[in-house]
Image (cartoon, rainbow, N blue to C red):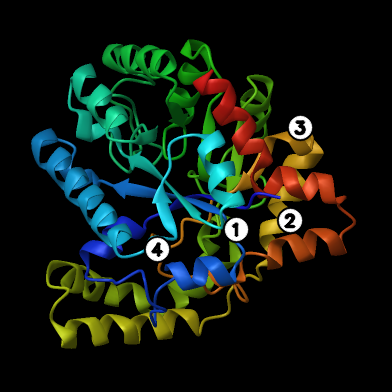
Amino acid sequence: MFVLDSHCDTPSQILRLRDISIDNDYAQVDIPKLKRGGVDGVFFALYIPSSMDTDPDAARAYAYRMLDGVRNSLDNNPDAVITTSVQQALENQSKGLLSIFIGLENGAAIGDSLDELRRFYAAGVRYVTLCHTGNNQICDSCAQKSGRWNGLSPFGKEVIAEMNRLGMLIDVSHISDDSFYDVIRHSSKPVVATHSCCRALASHPRNMTDDMIKALAAAGGVIQINFYPFFLDDSFRTVYDASGLAEKEHIEAEFIKDPADEQKRQSWNQVQDEIQSLQRPSYKRIVDHIDHVVSLVGIDHVGLGSDFDGIEVTPEGMEDISKFSLVFDEMRRRGYAEEDIEKVAGGNFFRVFDQVTA
């Protein structure tokens, strides 16, 4: 069984001076935790904040800075290697090596240039999340009340065609419902939602409706379940809002601006402790979302994309990636066959990956 997490925001944490070779306090992902969690491969997402949507040069520079950070980190970790294909990942597993795939979260970094998309592909990027929380030059975001394009832009349709030609995975997480259906209409290959949940179980706009999940599956794609409590269960929003912790969100922003400042780091760690002390949904809620997808479209269209290192709070019992295998234990408890667990662990995503790159 190959165990894959299709979305972790670890590159931005590396820029915040995390040494991923050691077991870090307050880190959701590092190499020791990946090993303890039995994870064989992970997509490190180069996350571009939507504040950079209108400055593609800055977004692109930031993406490559993160990519350089990942490469430099792996220079000191010979048991983890940048990986670009399913075949290479399986070979790595046989050698006891961790596979580190690269994704680009927010296509704003390519600007209006297909050449820049090709350069990211040549640099090892194997999926692009088309947008983040803002409407960009490619498509509209689910986080915006009104659309700029009412789906894909004309350039966005060119991006879809070029990603199909390159053999690059299209990530539909974060995009608006209209954008999603445009992608399904225009892509000649299956697409993925690398870190999303089911809107039927939690009514967040970041989650996918049942009809979207059915359309994704009909096109051969896969939804990778996100671990963020806000996306797993509506009840957590009520708990968080009542806590007053929203008033402390600026503390994280201050730490991000100056990660070398130990006082700012400690202040943010204290806020993290407060958030984690709230009543959170159990990690078993992740399996509820898996169950829901299976009830809609069968076992072949669901996997796991935690969003670790991009979420400030985790499910109860799933505090970091070292606990990843608990999902499979819960699936066994619910009666899933081992061959089905293997599909959810990574087999389904790899099937789509192979189809897209063929």
What mark, if any, has residue 100 been given in the picture?
none
- In x, y percent, where is residue 188? 52, 11
Q: CA distance from mark 2 to mark 4?
A: 22 Å
Classify 10 Å Cα crowding around label 2: few (below 14), some (14-19), many (20 and above).
Answer: some
Of marks 2 and 4, the one in the foreground: 4
At 32% from the left and 58% from the top, the residue drawn is 74
| Label 4 sits on residue | 309
- The residue shown at (69%, 35%) is 301
Q: Which residue is mark 3?
A: 297
Closer to the chain start, of discs 3 and 2, is 2
Amino acid type shown at disc 2: Asp
Residue 151 drawn at (x, y percent): 39, 21
Residue 156 visible? The answer is yes
Q: Tags 2 and 4 in contact by the CB under 8 Å rule? A: no
Is there CB contact under 8 Å for labels 1 and 2?
yes
Q: Nearer the viewer, residue 102 or 227?
A: 102
**Residue picked out by circle 1:** 232
Secondary structure under the numbered disc 1 in the rendered image: helix
Q: What residue is rendered at 56% in x and 34% in y?
A: 87
Q: Is residue 294 left or right of residue 129?
A: right
Q: Earlier in the sequence, mark 3 or mark 1?
A: 1
Quadrant of residue 8 in the image? bottom left
Gap in Å between the C-alphas at discs 1 and 2? 9 Å
Residue type highlighted by circle 1:
Leu
| Sequence-first disc among 4 and 1 | 1
The nearer-to-camera label among 4 and 1 is 4
Distance CA(mark 3)–CA(mark 1)? 19 Å
Residue designated by label 2 = 288
Report the side of 114 relative to 21 (left or right).
left
Work out whether residue 134 or residue 183 is closer to the camera in this orientation and state it: 183
Q: Determine the secondary structure under disc 4.
A: loop
Percent across and percent down for residue 60 are 16, 38
